[in-house]
Structures are given as structure tokens and as C-alpha cells.
Amino acid sequence: MRQVRNSIVVAIAVITGIIILVGYFIELPVLKNLRIMLLHYAVIFIAVALIVGVVNLVQVHWKKFQNRQPGGVYSLILIISLLVTIIVVGYFGPTSTPSLWIFSNIQIPVASSLIAVLTVVLTYTGVRLLKRGLNLFSFLFMATVLIVILGTVSFQGFRIPGLSELRTWITQVPAVGGARGILLGVALGTIATGMRILMGSDRPYGR
Amino acid sequence: MSDDIKPNTETSPEDGKEFDKSGEVQKSTAEQSFQDSSSDNQPGQEKKNPERLADAIPDDKTSDDVAEKSLVQDSQEDGEELADDQSDRGVEDKDQPKLVKGEQEVHTREEQDGPLVGVEGVLPAELDPYFIHEPVRRSIKLQVTEAQETQALLLDQMIKGEIEPQPEVTRSKSASNNILRIGIAVFLLVSILLPLSTRVPASITPPVSRDSVSANQLIESISDGATVLLSVDYEPGLSAEMDAALASVVDRMMMKDFYLVLVSTVPTGPVQAERLLVFLNQGGGYQYESSENYTNLGYIPGGPIGLLNFAEAPRQVMPYDLDGNAVWYSPPLQNISSLSDFDLVVVATENPDRGRSWVEQVQPKLGNTPIILVVSRQAEPFVRPYYGSEPSQIQGLVSGFGVGAFYLNSNAQAGFSSMYWSSLNLALIVGGLLMLIGAVIYAGKSLNTRKPE
Amino acid sequence: MNYVYLLYIVDSGILGLGFVLIFFFMMIISAIIVRRRDEPLLREIPTYSKLKRSINLSVESGQRLHLSLGSGGINYMQGGSALAGLSLLKRLYRMAGLSDRPPVVTSGDGTIGVLSRDCIRSVYEEVGVREEYEPTSGQVSGLTPGSYIAGTLPVILDQQVSTNILMGHFNSEIALLADASERRGSLTVAGSDNITAQAVGYASTEDLLVGEELYASGAYIQASTMHVASLHAQDFLRWAIVAVILVAGALKLAGVL
């Protein structure tokens, strides 16, 4: 029975994937309508998964608070904040003054603080980069970082001659070329992952 | 006893007579009792006992008698076990082969005197004093050679090494790392706050790029009152940079009284867009009202999938605005049935993947409608190829805070934006210097450690 | 050259569909070749060797593993990296699911959270200990990239994690996770499809999977035939793309295109 159920699940996944893939490339009205319908369902599932994610978040943090694990108090604060935000935004609307107040005075400062900490961490990482050892690649990495930074800034209106042009060249030529190469590889990997799922040989959805 | 369990012994004489130096063995009473204690003896079976090994040793070695006798006892025990085994299997004594080397067939004694005359296996009345002796002091020292002892020691060390847990290689958690982190944070904080606190004059102007000038010209070329699709697609954490960059573009559009249709593929995007308009209303003196001057359609779920759906059928995918009004059937959106009916599309994002999704999924559906990307500095290299291609897929590219600050120079925000630029400038210099110092120090250490090699 | 015809091929999607079909057939052919070999022919990626070893060591020492699948959902292109992480998750739970401290999985997307819990549950069912399954083993730490990072940091800092495996879609915030891991003295193995994250990861971790190495996790950890075959197909097509780029560039320089 389980075998039959698994086969049906795999068949649904494969057929759906093929319809959307072929419908994307070939402009046939039947395929297009089918693709749009399936994508609409997918969007609904994704939105529901968002809600499931919120429920899971609450579950995890409630359990953390119940079991008195380290940081359990923060978990309680998270749950209370979640409930308050849902109530305020649900009652007043997402673009109302109270909602904007919560967003401007809580969410943005918290998110910005995280980015500020990230800045310190990235600087710290840059300072200690060569601690692992000096080799060609780490030297090139550090040199590129310094050229880009120093090519961006000016000191009392004074810029190091040529550095700005070098910075522009680095960011627009080798960096972009390298990024494109990596992105091509990533795209091939993504296609391969998708193909394995379409062929039924890779099943990230359980058994 | 079957052949397969016969021990590997030398051939011994059939009757053991070779070892029977004293003729018939006069077993002591102790021996007799020892032998007779076996309860597995079958009646009528002659019990075969192992030969006293002492008989193999010349008689003149009387000083070893004690040890020999204990050896005999041991061998007798072994012999009895084997004999028991044999008797368990019901093997006839006469068929049993020799079990132990030097084994001699010994017969039990029949009682000759007393009331138990004729009875076999009787405990003797008197103990034979010959067998009363001190227990043999055996040497417990293992008789091994020096080579064997060395090998055994090695084996013991090997095994001990396996049992003892290896110390884990722990990574250093030095306090100096925390001090370094705090030091870097202090330096950066001071460099950011210094220009703001001292109100550095706006002598440092942010750079202007050709791309932003062309974006500005594109906006200027569109007639007043046009309908523009504006996507606010950046996370709250980077709103500082993105608000500054986007505010300048939106400010320009508000000056020309464009009708803005707001969407987002980020859940917080709609609120972010509202916040920006409130900020510009307050700072720029505008009075943009929902439904009058702009419409907020809200969040498009599904990422690129949702975006593609929206591009193909915007009215079906987003039929209502955030307030629940059906906006597509009233001016100015009643004439808009697809994205190509908009006069301009502006997308603001800090994420290059989202920017690429707009270009790859939506731009092909735009027809002649131009698209401008407002991106963060980190995303600019990845979307630039779309701007630089022929024909270019995007018609305007505004990147980073600096360009936004340039735009804001045209109004009252000029001084403020220059201070921000000064802070950014100084922080970048300090950060770069710190990394340079760190690189020199660690590179020097690395070279020093290599030198002895 | 008839550019209109060329543009038609590109615009009409035939080129895209043809590419996908070529990929499909290359995978089939590679799978047939791979099946005939005793050992898969793969170059060594030291990060995966280190990863396998660290998984075994963590189980033996009774410490926890942490796998983070990133903030990209399956509806994005970044979903591929998350699916690569899910392949690793199955293997991880088969090896370490019944230890004293089973691995903990975090993600920043609802769909990936659901899939991760499904994977964990299916592994427990396979080995016949369904009752050991805890829904909180697969956690959604946050639903935006920033909140996801903020929610994942306590897992690294508080749950005695010996190895952090970061495989999925991350932005530059991956540096925060790597830094937290370093402060706890844990090993970090990272891989992301995002260019910025890869650059940041190079500076902040010692073991980084660059580019498509992330998608090779199935082949190196599970070594199933189709995973290895898809790697070979990728290699073939990568060379084909390189050839096309070089030829097109040459034609452009010559003024033909």
C-alpha cells in the first residue's frame, strides 16, 4: 500500500513538473492555462507554508520557554511580540499609524542593528584573513578588498589617482565575469537538481 | 573417544608399561580417593587415570617429589575430566586411547581388610603419610623469554593507547578575539559619529555616475501625471541605504505628480513603501494620499513564480489594494490591463537575485515600457550586465547611497546627506586601514614562521 | 546570418527546451556509464571528506550537529541549494539521528521547514523508531533573512554544537553564523549559491563549497548513481557553454555577430 502511495506521489510530482517546464517553453494555450492554474495552486501552497512556518516558530519557542532552556525568556518575548503585532496589524491595518510605528521603531532598528553587527564582523574577518596563512589567493582577496574600499573613498576631496578607475574596472570586468561563471555553474546545478526530481530519482519530500 | 577430539600427543606405549618403572603402581590412598571421587564412573569400568608424571623423572630426584606430586594431582584432575567426558559418552575403557602423554593405566584398589573387604572405591582408613605435605609453592612468574616479554609489553602499550581517549583538538577561544572585536566596533562607531557630531561641512560631495544621470533624464522625459509601477523589494535592515537611494528617485517622480502603483515581493515591502511616502510627504512638502495619488497593491507571494503570474495577469493576481478596494476599475488604473500599459517601472532592491527576477521574468512582458533599477552597491555588479547589454534590458541604473545623496542635494536635504556621506567615507577609510594593518601583521607572522623552513 | 531566425529561436523558448532535453539525455547516458564502473570517478573535494569525518566524530563524542538550510524557498531559483541541503539532511539523520543529541535543522522558509521535518520523520520511519521523531527537530528560525539569522544564532551558541553545516541560500549574513561558530570553537562547513555569501564565506570559514560544489553533496555523501551522473552531465555542458562563449566572442570580435 505504501509502495502504491509513494508511486502516486512521485507520479504527481513528475507530471506537474513536466507540464510547467514544457508550458514555460512552448506557447500552447492548453499548456499555458494548465501551467497558470498549477502555479496559482503553488502560490497558495507557498502562502500556506508561510503560515505553517509561523506556527512552527511559535511551537519551537514555546517549547523552549516551557523547558526553561537558555534564552527561554527571549522566546516568551518573541511570542508576545508576535501576538501583539498580529493583533495591532490585523485590527488597524498594515499601513495604519500603529503598524507603521511598530515597523519604524522596532523592526527597522533591530534589523539595522543586525547589519551593523555584520559590518563589525566583516571588518574583523577582513583583519584576520591572513591569519590562516599567506597564499596567492588570500593575498589577491585582500588586495581587491582594499582597492575597492580605497577607490570608493576620498579624503578631504583628495582621491588616489588611478585607484578609482582601477576599482571601477575590477567591479565591472573581472568581478562580473567571475560572478557570471559561478552563476552559470549554480544554474547548471539547479537544473540538475530539478531534473533529478523530475526523473523521480531524488525525493526531497520524504520517502 | 573419537579420533577428532584426540589431543595431539606423542604415541605412547599401549599399556604405558614403558613408564611403569616400578611395576604395578601402588597408588596411595589419596590417589585412590581422588580417583574414586569421580561419580561418573560406570560400574565395572576400569578407570584410567593419567600417569604420574613423576614416574618419568628418575628416582634420584627426590627433592622434586613435592612439586611432582602436585603436577600429578593436576594431571590427574585433567585426566579425570577427560575420563568423565569419556564415560559420559559411554565409551568402553578398553577402547579408550591414551589421553595424555605418559599416561599409564592404573586400576583401582579393592579393599582387602575390614568390613568393606571386596568393595572398590572405598576411602582408606589411614591416610598415607606420604601424601601429607605442605602445599606446593608454585612460582607464579610466567616463564617467558626476554623477547617475549618485550613483545608483550609492546602489545600492552598498544592496547592502552586504544583505550585512552585522545585529547580533542580544541580551537582556541582566546579573549583577545573579543577585545579585537570590541576595538574594531569602537573605531567604526567613532568614525561614523564624528562627522555627525561635529557637523562636517558639505565639502565632500558624493560621486555622480552616468547611469544615474541617464535615469534622471529618463524620468524627466516622461510627461507629468504618468502611471508608474513602483516595486519596493528590499529588506528592512538595508533600508538606510535603499531609502536614501530610492527617496531621491521617488522625490523626482512626486515632483512630476506621477501616480504610483506600489507592489512588493518581500512581505515587509508594502509597509516599507508606505513609510517612504510618509517620509517624503513630511520632508518634501507633498500631500500624496492613498487612492488619490498612489495605490498600494501589497505583497506578491511566490517569489519569481508569483512575479511571472503578476506580469502575465496583474488584474487577476492582485485584484485589490491593501484596504480591500477594487482599484482596477476606477481611474487611473481602469486603462491598465497589462504591465506594458504602465509608463514606467521602477524596482528598488538590495538583492541581485530579486533584481534579476524582475529583469528576466517581467521585462520581456513590458514591451516599450522602460524599467529603472535602484539597487544597493553590493548588487550593482550583478545587474550591470543587463544595463550594459545591447539592446539594454534596463534603461536606468541607480546604485547606492551616494547617488541618492546627489539627488537630495537639489533640495533642503543637501547638508544632511553630505554629513551621511562624510560618515560613510570616514568609516570606510578606518575599516580599510584596520584591514591593512591586520594584513601586514599576520602576513609578517606568516612569513616569519615560514623562514626556518 | 539570419538574425531574425536566430532571435526567433531564442525568443520562442525552443533553445531553452532544447538545452533541457540535452541535459536530460546526457544524464541518462552518464548514468549508464556510471553504473558500469565500480567506483564513481569524482575529483576530491576536501570539504566533503572533512564533513564526513566531523559527522562521525560528533556522533562519537556525543555532541550535536547543526544543519542550516538557508532562507531560500523552493519557489525561488535558490531552492536548488536548499534541495541539495535536504539530500544531506537525510544522510545526516541516518548516521546521527539515534545519537544522544540528534542533529538540529534550521531553515528560513516555511516550505523548506516542512520538507525538512518530512525528511527527518521519514528517516525515523525507515529505521523503525517513529516515536523518536520530534517536530521541533526541524525548526523555522525566522521568515526573513535577518530574523532567520537572529533565530539561528542561539542554536549555534547554546546547544553544544560541534559542527555547523550551512548549506542553502545565504546572503552576507552568513558571516554572523560563521563568527558565532568560531566563538564556540565549532567546525563550520558552508556552501551557498549566492555570490556575496561565497565571498564572505571565503573570508570567514576554512571549509567552503564554491559554486556548484554545493550541488554535488548528493554524489559525495550518498554517491547514488543519478547524483554522480548529473555531475558528469554538468561537466559536459559546462564545457559546451565555454565553447559557445569563446566562439561567440570570436565571432563578435571578427564583426560577424
Image (tube, coloured by chain):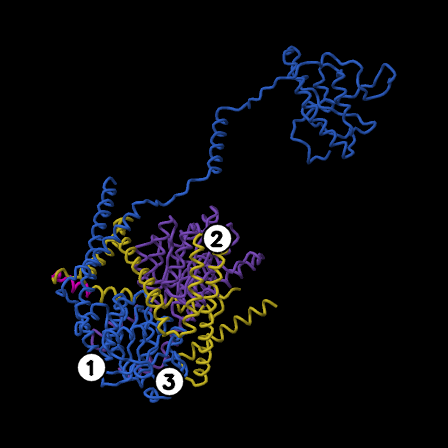
Q: Distance between the residues labelled 2 and 3?
A: 50 Å
Q: Is residue B105 left or right of residue A65?
A: right
Circles 1 and 3, Cβ within 8 Å, touching? The answer is no
Dot 1 falls on which chain?
B
Dot 2 falls on which chain?
A
Q: Please give the count of numbered marks on the rendered protein.
A: 3
Colour for chain B in the figure:
blue
Q: Which region is colored magenta? A: A158-169
Residue B70 lies within the magenta run: no
Colour for chain A in the figure:
yellow
Q: Where is residue B407 in the image (x, y as percent from the top left)?
A: 19, 73
* Tag 2 residue: A68
Q: Which of B149 and B210 is in front in this view?
A: B210
Name the secondary structure under disc 1. Answer: helix
Name the secondary structure under disc 3. Answer: helix
Quarter of the picture containing the C terminus of chain B is: top left
* Tag 1 residue: B220
**Mark 2, other Cα within 10 Å: few <14 / some 14–19 / many ≥20:** few
Q: In the rendered structure, which amino acid carries the disc numbered 1?
A: Glu
Q: In the rendered structure, which amino acid carries the disc numbered 2?
A: Arg
Residue A166 lies within the magenta run: yes
Looking at the rendered image, the disc whose residue lies closer to the viewer, 2 or 3, is 2
> In which quarter of the view is residue B81 placed?
top right
First in sequence, mark 1 or 3: give its number: 1
Circles 2 and 1, Cβ within 8 Å, touching? The answer is no
Q: Where is residue A31 in the image (x, y as percent from the top left)?
A: 45, 82
* Tag 3 residue: B327
Q: Which residue is drawn at 27% across and 84% down?
A: B343
